[in-house]
Image: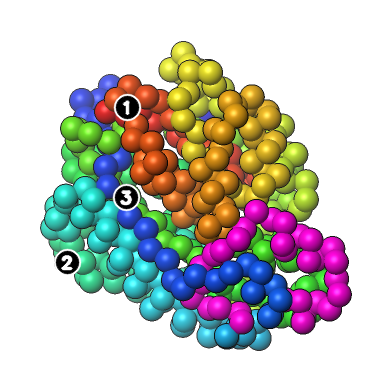
Amino acid sequence: MSQPLHARRSVRPIVTGQGSAFPQAMAQSAIWERFFKPRMGENRVAEGLFMHCGVETRHGVADPTAEDVSGWSTGRRMRRYLPEARELGRQAIAQALANASLDPAEVAQLIVVSCTGYATPGLDILLADDLAMPTGVQRLIIGHMGCYAAIPALGAAADFVVAHGRPSVVLCVELPSLHVQPAEADRDLQQVVAHALFADAATAFVVEPDAPSGLEVLSTAAVTAPGTSPLMSWDVTDHGFRMGLSPRVPSVLSMHVLDAMADLLKPHDLDAGDIDEWVVHPGGPRILDVIGQRLQLPEHSLDISREVLRLNGNCSSSTVMLVLKELRRQRTPVPGQRMVAIAFGPGLTLCSTLLQAV
């Protein structure tokens, strides 16, 4: 159910600075021609899925055309994950803090989101030290929630800001390029789709109390479709993490998105027609199509989501914040404008947040 953050509070949580960082860029066509096509042979179905998934370029710490990690053990992948995620996370957080004109010494909470790697000591401890945050900074790690995890992380940050009146920073860092599966997995078309869509990125954002400008977090909501947990999975194997992704996912999400929006908007006496901007996680082109149709969104409402997918791929939890960052860059929100950010992931779960420009 929706959790209005404005109820009984004197502090307003405002999203101020945002930052992002990417590893090397890769062309989708080159990845297909030079790596996956030789593995799959003349598989026209696989080629169609790979080349018509809405992605033209993406980024990865492991470029399969130069470095084949598909035979690596999970342990070796995790040893690669930590330094790569640490550097990308440092860049993204530093950019977000600079964008917010906030000194690292002022950060009171650091939340790190990732489902593509594990390490202890974790990125939260290492990055707090790298960026000279206070030794008393409160830390939280959110893992294995997948593509929607940025939304509950935003809700946790907003709750912290309301409760403590001090700034919070959220980092989402995902490196799915480290989880290319062994060649025998290519017989599974779900793996083909996963390999075609997912890419690496880090995004960070700052939530501050009563900032003079930015996006106020009004509420968050979550809806989990019953009986759908087998449709999307992320399993730890001896050779990295393996994605399960049913072709039924878009249609199931479309069946529940209206309930998700009602849970988010009704407590504020709003409906979809009252929303000025839509920040929708581009899980794939079909997902964007069915969400746009189901919510009856105006033409071009999802253009930025499609652009982020085209240029960056699906970067799991980082993606919805990449869409938000690009929307703020292209169309500076006018005070009073409302926007909804919504993302989808395992469960099947739809998480959303209502924001208002100040």
Q: What residue did someone put label 2 on?
A: 132
Q: Residue at x 56, y 78 (%)?
A: 63
| Badge 1 vs badge 3, beta-carbon distance below 8 Å | no
Q: Is residue 258 left or right of residue 3?
A: right
Question: Which of 154 and 3 lies nearest the eye of the viewer?
Answer: 154
Q: Relative to residue 203, is residue 284 drawn left or right?
A: right
- The amino acid type found where label 1 is placed reads Val
Numbered disc 1: secondary structure: loop
Query: Which one is in front, 160 or 113?
Result: 113
Q: Earlier in the sequence, mark 1 or mark 3?
A: 3
Q: How far separated are the C-alphas under marks 1 and 2?
A: 34 Å
Q: Secondary structure at mark 2?
A: loop
The disc, 2 or 3, on the residue closer to the chain's N-terminal end is 3
Which residue corresponds to mark 3?
Answer: 18
Q: Residues within 10 Å of mark 2 (few under 14, many from 20)?
A: few
Q: Residue at x 55, y 71 (%)?
A: 26
Which quadrant would residue 259 be assigned to in this image?
Answer: top right
What mark, if any, has residue 334 been given in the picture? 1
Say left or right for 168 vs 132: right
**CA distance separating discs 2 and 3:** 19 Å
Instruction: Look at the image and give the residue range highlighted in magenta.
Output: 36-65
Residue 154 lies left or right of residue 117; in this view the side is left
Give the residue type that dot 2 points to: Ala
Residue 215 located within the stretch drawn in magenta: no
The quarter of the rendered structure image containing the C terminus is: top left
Q: x, y percentage for residue 337? A: 37, 24
Residue 160 picture quarter: top left
